[in-house]
Amino acid sequence: MNFKRVILAGTALGLLSCFSGCSAPMKLLKSRAKAETTSVETDSAETPDSKMPVLYTDKDSLQSGTGVMDDDAPLEFTTTRSGLKYRVLRHSDDRKPLAHNTVTVNYRGWLDNGREFDSSYKSGEPISFPLAGVVAGWTEGMQLVGDGGMIELWIPPDLGYGAAGSPPSVPPNAALHFVVELLAVK
């Protein structure tokens, strides 16, 4: 299959200096922009956002280096009231975490320009952390998928690192993109 990527027009961040070995979840644990521990409201305010571009246009590119996703995974993102965009890539009817739970995940994170800034897949080990101790976009987004599921998160700057960024790997006001497999909920 062809591994084409569509880069978001007008939002490419240019040349960034991303040093290998940075650890997004560890940094997510240390810095929490607008970090409020809240439950996710998923009601009629959420609607598919067909105008939202998709970074990866085919399943093989999105799934590259991650776990298996459903054949019928949606192409469109859903937007929550907070502005978080997500799509469930592997459905699970198992337990969904709450903000007070600890989760174990595998993940891959990249910026708008497609540059990967962190991956537990590359390090070869999943990571566990209290869901209430990460950036608001992760806290909210991980409550939308069941144990064993996989989700893609498109986190706007105000739910991520905001104006401060997370140097050297994440510049100020950067949108964050993640594919996350939820391996366990405690």
Image (spheres, helix red, strand yellow):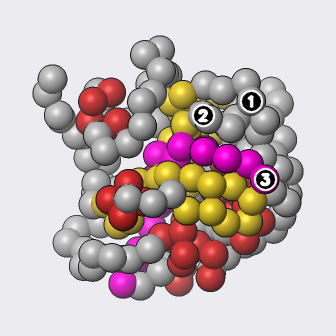
Q: Amino acid at mark 2?
A: Gly
Where residue 15 sits: x, y (%)? 20, 72
- Marks 1 and 2 close (CB-CB < 8 Å): yes
Where residue 57 sits: x, y (%)? 29, 30
The answer to whether residue 115 is above or below residue 183 is below
Quadrant for the N terminus, please.
top left
Q: Amino acid at mark 1?
A: Asp
Q: At 34% across and 36% down in the image, what residue appears?
A: 63
Residue 186 got which mark?
Answer: 3
Secondary structure beneath dot 2 equals loop
Q: Amino acid at mark 3?
A: Lys
Quick one: label 2 or label 3, which is nearer the N terminus?
2
Quick one: label 1 or label 2, which is nearer the N terminus?
1
The answer to whether residue 152 is above or below residue 123 is above
Residue lying at the far front of the rendered structure: 125
Q: At 45% across and 27% down in the image, what residue appears?
A: 69
Q: At 26% across and 36% down in the image, what residue appears?
A: 61
Q: Report if residue 181 lies within the magenta region.
A: yes
Residue 94 got which mark?
Answer: 1
Snapshot quadrant of residue 159: bottom right
The answer to whether residue 112 is above or below residue 76 is below
| Viewer-closest of 23 and 52 | 23
Q: Is the residue marked by circle 2 packed among few (<14), some (14-19), or many (20+) residues within 10 Å?
A: many
Q: Which residues are magenta?
A: 168-186
Residue that mark 2 sits on: 149
Tell me, yes or no, if residue 76 can be seen here.
no
Tell me, yes or no, if residue 31 can be seen here.
yes
